[in-house]
């Protein structure tokens, strides 16, 4: 088998065989394939695409390129929830304790953030002492003991994706739908969960700006999951404004705790109830979405979800007192309010700009090697549809560098678009994609 012929075959629009795809991934991982040939293959895929069988075979080959986690020692059905990325998205941090409180094990591998905000790992490390490096034995033991564990991805998990993504990033092939799907799903399949729920964001703060593209990506990932005999559900949700009010690592931990106390933002809790209900039904813990939703709400009202969060923090070395004392979290040295200069209604928020504000303050990475400031970020006080008066506080910035704060304030002001007339709020949950097809929520 020869790589030049495979590149030419894909360049000319023909489908590749399972053996050819496995040959590509083997050469990618063991270093026998030159990067220029792999880059040429990716560009051919970018223009010619992959059919369903090719996409599935590429995903399976990538998943099998390194360590495959065996979670069979964990009791019960294991669930995993993945988001395609957004601004202020701390859903996993709230949802995982709720599910664990319902008796549904959550065994999740997660990565650090790259871009305008930190990832789930970064947010958790805002809690003093919290450790995300765990052995497989510790990971499994903790899930069996308290029903929840979240650890950083090992270097051996899907090494093919690490190499391919790095090349996609510098060759202009990131946006190809099948390559996005294989990147996400190879990691999900390698992570060993029984049920996968995918939160596919659509809007100005998401990778998929158009709802139709988000639906297409969701369909492709669900098809891959089903072909791999994994129960897979994709839910298309709105990301035209930040989720919740807080954007920034320690600020989002504080909002997470408030949500678990029942005081969190309505949109954040709603997503957790929707996602959790579908997972409980898929795992056969409840017969209906309505019953599952009631059960999830009860974990908040009873305080069981908060107790599970405290257990989780304590088990991974974090200080559980953070739940009652937010001063234990990293604190920015400068606080600055953004004041409205007019009266009206919030018509639109450029969501991606809010993320860039956080990055300007130091709360995001440009490269994976960058360090981030866990204390900085933005807390919004007004969101789409809210009425405001001249002099009202639109948002509050938290930072440690005055010059960056001033630049961030100008960026934040430009992100808000106001209307003189009332504005209808956008629907949060749009579409459900499963083995039953695509359904409007």
Image: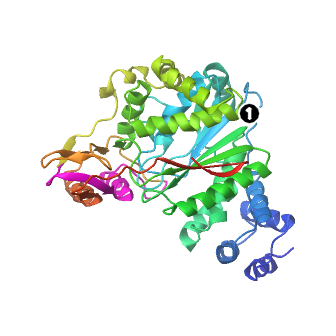
In percent of width and height, residue 106 lies at 62, 31
- According to the picture, the residue beneath numbered tag 1 turns out to be 71
Residue 24 in magenta stretch: no
Residue 367 in magenta stretch: yes
**For the residue carrying disc 1, how many other residues have a C-alpha within 10 Å: few (<14), some (14-19), or many (20+)?**
some
- 58 or 181: nearer the viewer: 181
- 149 or 410: nearer the viewer: 410
Which secondary structure, mark 1? loop
Q: Taking the image as drawn, is residue 156 in sight?
A: no
Quadrant of the image containing the N terminus: bottom right
In percent of width and height, residue 316 lies at 53, 26
63 relative to 324 in the view: left or right = right
Above/below status of 214 relative to 393: below
Q: Taking the image as drawn, is residue 231 in sight?
A: yes
Residue sitting at 31 percent across and 47 percent down?
383
Which stretch did the figure color magenta? 339-368
Residue sitting at 73 percent across and 54 percent down?
223
Above/below status of 115 relative to 32: above
Q: Residue 414's image quarter?
A: bottom left
């Amino acid at each position: 088998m020869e790589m030049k012929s495979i590149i030419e075959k894909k360049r000319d629009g023909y489908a590749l065989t399972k053996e050819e795809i496995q040959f590509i991934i083997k050469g990618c991982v063991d270093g026998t394939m030159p990067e220029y040939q792999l880059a040429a293959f990716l560009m051919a895929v970018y223009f010619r695409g992959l059919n369903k069988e090719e996409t599935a075979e590429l995903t399976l080959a990538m998943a099998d390129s390194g360590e495959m986690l065996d979670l069979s020692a964990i009791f019960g059905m294991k669930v995993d929830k993945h988001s395609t990325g957004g601004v202020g998205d701390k859903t996993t941090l709230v949802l995982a304790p709720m599910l664990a409180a319902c008796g549904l094990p959550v065994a999740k591998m997660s990565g650090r953030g790259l871009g305008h905000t930190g990832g789930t790992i970064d947010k958790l490390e805002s809690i003093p002492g919290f450790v995300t490096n765990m052995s497989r034995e510790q990971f499994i033991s903790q899930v069996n003991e308290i029903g929840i564990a979240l650890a950083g991805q090992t270097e051996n998990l899907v090494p093919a994706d690490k190499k391919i993504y790095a090349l996609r990033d510098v060759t202009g092939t990131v946006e190809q739908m099948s390559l996005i799907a294989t990147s996400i799903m190879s990691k999900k399949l390698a992570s060993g969960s029984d049920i996968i729920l995918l939160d596919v964001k659509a809007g100005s703060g998401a990778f998929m700006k158009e709802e139709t593209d988000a639906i297409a990506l969701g369909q492709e990932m669900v098809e891959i999951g089903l072909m791999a005999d994994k129960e897979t559900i994709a839910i298309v949700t709105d990301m035209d404004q930040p989720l919740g009010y807080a954007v920034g690592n320690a600020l989002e931990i504080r909002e997470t705790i408030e949500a678990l106390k029942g005081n969190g933002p309505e949109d954040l809790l709603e997503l957790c109830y929707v996602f959790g209900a579908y997972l409980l039904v898929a795992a056969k813990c409840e017969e209906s979405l309505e019953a599952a939703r009631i059960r999830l709400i009860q974990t908040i009202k009873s305080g069981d979800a908060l107790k599970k969060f405290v257990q989780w923090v304590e088990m991974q070395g974090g200080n559980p007192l953070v739940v009652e004392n937010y001063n234990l979290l990293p604190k920015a040295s400068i606080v600055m309010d953004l004041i409205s200069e007019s009266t009206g209604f919030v018509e639109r928020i450029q969501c991606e700009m809010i993320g860039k504000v956080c990055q300007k303050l130091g709360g995001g990475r440009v490269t994976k090697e960058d360090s981030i400031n866990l204390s900085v970020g933005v807390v919004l006080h007004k969101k789409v549809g809210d009425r405001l008066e001249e002099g009202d506080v639109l948002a509050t910035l938290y930072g440690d560098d005055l010059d960056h704060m001033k630049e961030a304030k100008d960026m934040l002001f430009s992100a808000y678009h106001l209307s003189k007339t009332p504005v209808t709020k956008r629907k949060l949950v749009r579409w459900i994609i499963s083995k039953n097809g695509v359904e409007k929520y």
